[in-house]
Image (tube, grey):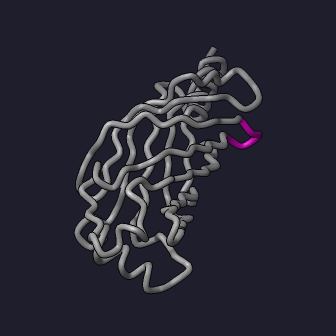
Amino acid sequence: MKYILLFVCCTVATLAQAQRFATRDARIAFLSETPVEDIRAESTEASAIMDLANGQVAFQVPILSFHFPKALMEEHFNENYMESERFPKATFRGTVNGLDAAQSGVQNVTAKGTLEMHGVAVEREVSGTMEQTASGWVLDARFDVPCADHDIDIPKVVTENIAEVIAVTLHAELKAK
């Protein structure tokens, strides 16, 4: 009886652990596309955690981890627009809807939650896909972020160079914890 109880406790503990998935190297990229200029940046330092038991998901990315093709763009982004020293990270906390952990293949999902960036929290609904792999889940999403929603001011002198709405893409490979 003692061994059966021990087996059950270990099995429950393993199942509980298998409900959490995380990464420290998710990729987040963005594109500001205008007729005058396209501005791209990428970070591979985003962290993410997902709990299948309750559908909760959270992402965090250090703003200084975004890198641009041109050093001057990166400097302007951090100092003038994102004020990275004052607002060092962007976060999203929410709940994934539409995921069936028992189903294989790519699944369309929606995450509803709060995107906090530049000191401003905004409720968002983000559509994406998730696919179960041997080691966890792959999550991909694309969504738009209007600069004005997060009080990111674009000076009139560069309004033709910087889009008012930024396209964001996310790729995360979450492993069991």
- Quick check: 29 left or right of 149? right
| Part of the protein shown in magenta | 132-136
Query: In what quadrant of the picture does the N terminus appear?
Result: top right
> Magenta-highlighted stretch: main secondary structure?
loop
Camera-nearest residue between 9 and 24: 24
- Quick check: 2 left or right of 151? right
Determine if residue 39 is in view.
no
Instruction: Looking at this view, name the residue that lies furthest to the top.
Output: 1
How many marks can you see? 0
Within the magenta stretch, is there residue 40?
A: no
- The residue drawn where x is 49% and y is 63% is 34
- Rendering coords of residue 75 (x, y %): 38, 82
Q: Give the answer, above or below, for where 127 lies relative to 75.
A: above
- The residue drawn where x is 50% and y is 53% is 167
Within the magenta stretch, is there residue 135?
A: yes
Query: In what quadrant of the picture does the C terminus appear?
Result: top right
Camera-nearest residue between 79 and 163: 163
Camera-nearest residue between 61 and 51: 61
- Rendering coords of residue 62 (x, y %): 40, 65
Q: Give the answer, above or below, for where 99 lies relative to 141.
A: above
- The residue drawn where x is 61% and y is 32% is 14
Camera-nearest residue between 105 and 18: 105
- The residue drawn where x is 50% and y is 30% is 96
- Quick check: 51 left or right of 130? left
- Rendering coords of residue 124 (x, y %): 38, 37
- Rendering coords of residue 28 (x, y %): 53, 58
Q: Give the answer, above or below, for where 116 lies relative to 80.
A: above
- Quadrant in which residue 74 is drawn: bottom left
Determine if residue 107 is in view.
yes
